[in-house]
Amino acid sequence: MREYAIDKTRNIGIIAHIDAGKTTITEGILYETGVTHNIGAVHEGETVTDWMEQERERGITITAAAVTCYWKGNKINIIDTPGHVDFTVEVERSLRVLDGAVVVFDGKMGVEPQSETVWRQADKYGVPRVCFINKINQTGGDFYKSLDSIHKRLSPNAYPIQIPIGFEKDIRGIIDLVKMKAYTYKEFKDKALTEEEIPADLAEKAKEYRQKLIEKVVEIDDALMEKYLAGTELTEAELLEAIRKSTIGGNFYPVLGGDGRGVIVHTLLDAINMYLPSPLDKQNIVGVNPKVKEAEVEGAEKIIRKPDDAEPFTALAFKIANDPFVGKLAFFRVYSGTLQAGSYILNTRSGNKERVGRIVLMKANDRQDIKEVYAGDIAALVGPKETVTGDTLCDLDHPIRLESIKFAEPVISMAIEPKTKADQEKMGIALSRLAEEDPTFHIKGDEETGQTIISGMGELHLEIIVDRMKREFKVEANVGKPQVAYKEKFKKIVESEGKYIRQSGGKGQYGHCRIRLEPREPGAGFTFESEIVGGVIPREFIAPIEKGVKEAAENGVIAGYPVIDFFCAVYDGSFHEVDSSELAFKIAASKAFQDGVRSADPILLEPIMKVEVTVPEQFMGDVIGDINSKRGQVKEMNDRGNLKIIDSYIPLAEMFGYATALRSMTQGQGNYAMEFDHYDEVPRNIAAGIIESRAAVNARKGQ
């Protein structure tokens, strides 16, 4: 039996830049809703959602954690996500399945680099948002400056529904611009807000901000717009409904402010209930028949599922985790229908059915067994054999495939090897399980050297992976220096021919193809097409040609790095009735690709990072000089309080060890944030050195 009606359910994420206060706000919510009896401190490792040892030691969130609380008749499922760019995969997959989000900003810093990243991710999935400007009670906290940074860097459609009473340490409440009442508190630990009349010195400011609020939200409702223009006062109910409609429609972002530790959290909870959508408010989920190929999805007939318990079961697995007590967990969001423990489901990626053993609700790392889940719920399956991130799980008799989740490619690699022979087998198991959990963590074996290469989103990402291997899987490992994940590309359109002919007395080998290679725009990926007519190459040899091109592209041409963003068409060739084979055509295609790329003006690409450095003004000159010496480009400089903010683009290859160098340059007062932005061509003189170095390594391998 469903405990809460679907319209009384909220699935939300808490998203922000690192140190903005996401986890503290989640702790405040859990405390104010009665889930916990104290507010855990992040720096003391006491929080519910930061339950991993590494999270508690470092005071940062590494993995998204789900918790459930209840407020004024609503059930709120919350996912607290990491703020560090290295773990952005957790934000990406969470936003894919959530209905709404709370974006937290540090009131002292305003919009920061990862604030922009998570905002773009929310835009990508059309997630309605409420903004919470945190820490405005601290020295340097400024609600209005932070609001201005949101308008300049994110959206002019973010606007306050409440404004603070007081400034910095003297803040003692808020003015609700909808009800036009003041709500105050004396201590953070007060259990309730006191309703009062608006202080006389803030009355005009409150009227001004309410007027601007009304002007923002009546734009989407013609009837309200006419009423407003006629000079008729909107009722409280009309204004609430207008804010709700604008927020759910993605046209407006309510802004609140305060301190996430205290009673002011009540106003945030009210905003979540009032303005963020229930599963019923979201559009119907759309999928396709699982038999439709990925390349043909656009034109395929769509299958619609409504957020209703009576519909066939449809869910998306958005996160895999390895629990030390119960084994593999697959977190999933139910879009339609119901699922009972003991029943069977279809995984439309693998095409196999799977028995549902246990279903659990998660509170961070604690589990609660349940017998059934309903439309709109978020839960986890225990022990699924084949499920991976992005899989659609559905009713056996009503197959559907939902859009999966796309993740960024790793930008940094390092070699890893077990310290002892006893660790060899355990390391393989540990790495495969960690890769199953994290789609941005890749493993690749170097067959010639026997080394294992691990790749991820940053130095901290790989450091945490190695640490988890040691703690969770008891595997000791040695790691090499970080290596940049370079890519290769070519600039010209070329045609190329590949032949593979071997005769050894018996049945020979014969493969012959002509291909055309065309560079594509950044991020376009690889596309293959057959233009063969008249059967000059039989259909069964087309797939091996594509495979040969793919494998050759993965191993690179000029320096052994993957070739990216290109189109390949096979347009001609020949075959032998007896000697032709799949292997022969695969090898012929590989040769054609390598020869073609060499004549197509190939270049080396490197990851360029967006770097924001925060320093006191007296160190600005030294920092800019250092950025220039790293082949960096300063984009702009801004002020943030007494600090200078330097935005720049710097090649990742120049950023190793930057934290230490920056501390040295700024007497420990400088900080920086870095995220991947794009790939760009490596200057020819530097590329020559990289290619020469790779050639020397390959020569040593061949000895």
Image (spheres, rainbow, N blue to C red):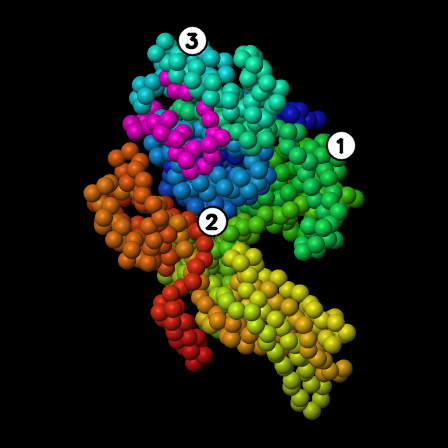
**What residue is pinned by disc 1?**
310
The dot on residue 12 is: none
Q: Quadrant of residue 52?
A: top left
Question: Can you identify the residue that label 2 sits on?
Answer: 472
Three-letter residue code for mark 1: Ala
Give the residue furthest to the front. Answer: 230
Residue 337 position in % (x across, y down): 72, 35
Q: How far across and how far down the image is residue 387, in percent?
A: 63, 49
Query: Label 3 sits on what residue type?
Result: Glu
Which residue is at the far bottom?
A: 505
| Residues at marks 2 and 1 touching, judged by CB atoms closer than 8 Å | no
Between discs 3 and 1, the one toward the N terminus: 3
Q: Is residue 659 above or below residue 495?
A: above
Categorize mark 2 by other alpha carbons within 10 Å: few (<14), some (14-19), many (20+): few
Q: Considering the numbered disc 2 on the image, is that residue within a helix, a strand or a loop?
A: helix
Could you tell me which quadrant the C terminus lies in? bottom left
Identify the residue at image location x=62%, y=44%: 317
Residue mark closest to the camera, 3 vs 1: 3
Q: Quadrant of residue 519?
A: bottom right
Q: Secondary structure at mark 3?
A: strand
Mark nearer the viewer, 3 or 2: 3
Quadrant of the snapshot with the N terminus: top right
| Comes first in the chain, label 3 or label 2 | 3
Q: Cα distance, mark 3 to mark 1?
A: 47 Å
Q: Which residues are magenta?
A: 137-165
User: Residue drawn 47% across and 13% down?
Assistant: 180
How far across and how far down the image is residue 628, in percent? 29, 55
| Residue 112 horizontal side relative to residue 582, left or right | left
Q: Which residue is mark 3?
A: 196
Q: Is residue 670 visible?
A: yes
From the viewer's side, name the closer residue of 495 and 7. Answer: 495
